[in-house]
Amino acid sequence: MAKAKKVIITCAPTGAIHTPSMSPYLPVTPDEIADAAIAAADAGAAILHLHARDPDDGRPTQDPAVFMEFLPRIQQSTDAVINITTGGAPQMTVEERMQPAMTFKPEVASLNMGTINFGLFPMLDRYEKDIKHDWERVHLSNKEIVFRNTFKDIEALMTMGQKNGTRFEFECYDIGHLYNLKYFVDKGIVKPPFFIQSVFGIFGGIGGHPEDLAHMKRTADRLFGDDYQWSILGCGTNQVKLASIGAAQGAHVRVGLEDSLWIGPGKLAESSAQQVKKVREILEGLSLEIATPDEAREILQLKGGDKIDLRHKTKKAA
């Protein structure tokens, strides 16, 4: 692992896992997503990992027209690195998931590195009485979700990234995903530095124990040596705990309401910016310096914010 001198904070202010009924603070409309992202950047996030939602019911969407309702405002208001999801939601086709990144050619796009069972159903008992939209119950109760990311799918996204100058946040939900990435590295399809986002605590992937984090790091060190930058994504109550452990070992961190709705035991976070501030206090308490957006671009060798394509006049899907 190449140890950067400064820690990159990535913030994911919305996402596809949680539903609007699970927290009144989850941003749904384009204005809410823009406000949340800008506030997170102001709090110290160098990278903004962005999803979109249908403003009527909060359902995740990959419609580029919805992204276009908040991307220009975010870019005009902050110099943070724009990172657009290609994960979307597990129920979407790969073609749907690719649309925003193909349209806007961002500096960074997320890329899930393998297929997993995606178990959200343990959440249903906690939130069922609060559900407002039928799709939320279907989303949370489904025990048959397979988050498809085949080798063909991954290669198509990697090839698209090369063409557009987009680099990837390689989301690794399990140890096998590191080996999948190594395959593409050995084929010469992707070049270092690899930005590996280790995802802990999704039911169906690796757990959230500190030993799981240690195993992930040992494996990545063996496979990639100094060619990768490591980042920690802990889901739910794992967010701050694992970010702290990882950062002490030289990792970057990711926070945001996509990954956890909480700011403390039993206390909902009122914004992703609040989570950014909390993790920043911890990092600075460890005598670690926080990377600016331009320093993140240098560490990850990104193409620059002026290379994002926001000229498109997209029409919102019916």
Image (cartoon, rainbow, N blue to C red):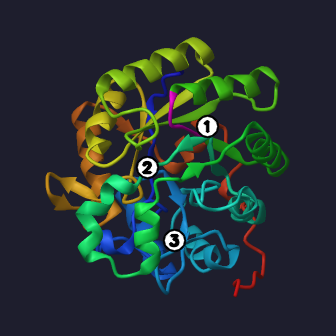
Kind of residue at disc 1: Leu
What's the magenta bit mostly, secondary-structure-wise? Answer: strand
Residue 66 appears in which quarter of the rendering? Answer: bottom right
Q: Nearer the viewer, residue 221 or 183?
A: 183
Q: Nearer the viewer, residue 12 or 182?
A: 182
Neighbourhood count class around disc 1 (C-alpha, 10 Å): few under 14, some 14–19, many 20 upward = many
Label 2 close to label 3 by CB (< 8 Å): no
Q: Which residues are magenta?
A: 170-174
Q: Secondary structure at mark 2?
A: loop
The answer to whether 177 appears left or right of 137 in the picture is right
* Nearest to viewer (mark 2 / mark 1): 2
Per the model, the C-alpha gap separating discs 2 and 3 is 36 Å
- Please say if 269 is above or below 316: above
Q: Return the residue found at the far top.
A: 222
**Comes first in the chain, label 2 or label 1:** 2
Q: What residue sits right under mark 3 in the picture?
A: 77
